[in-house]
Image (tube, rainbow, N blue to C red):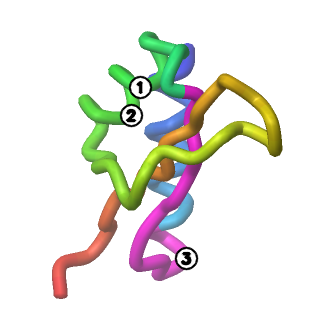
Amino acid sequence: MARALLDEITAWAISKGWERLALSVKTSNDAAVSLYLNSGFTAAGALEALRPGSALTVQSMIMKLRSG
């Protein structure tokens, strides 16, 4: 289900002429991290705390939709 939704979002973004998609994912969510990496997202930048004082971290990720 998640893969199908991500595919639809990606197709919609491409149809609108977007150059990239960006998101943040909790690094402890192995299933989501794997989905995004396998879908073409790459890590962008350093890990950050989920919120000030939190031990949980998030990773920003980007997927290029067009080359250039």
Is residue 28 in the magenta section?
no
* First in sequence: mark 3 vs mark 2: 3
* First in sequence: mark 3 vs mark 1: 3
Residue linked to disc 2: 36
Secondary structure type for disc 1: helix
Identify which residue is drawn at 26% across, 45% down. Answer: 40
Residue range in magenta is 14-26
Please name the amino acid that badge 2 sits on: Tyr
Q: Which mark is residue 33?
A: 1
Residue linked to disc 3: 16
Q: Are marks 1 and 2 in contact (CB under 8 Å)?
A: yes
Q: Nearer the viewer, residue 61 or 65?
A: 61
Tell which tag, 3 or 1, sits nearer the viewer.
Answer: 1
User: Outermost residue toward the front?
Assistant: 53
Q: CA distance from mark 3 to mark 1?
A: 25 Å
Please name the amino acid that badge 3 sits on: Lys
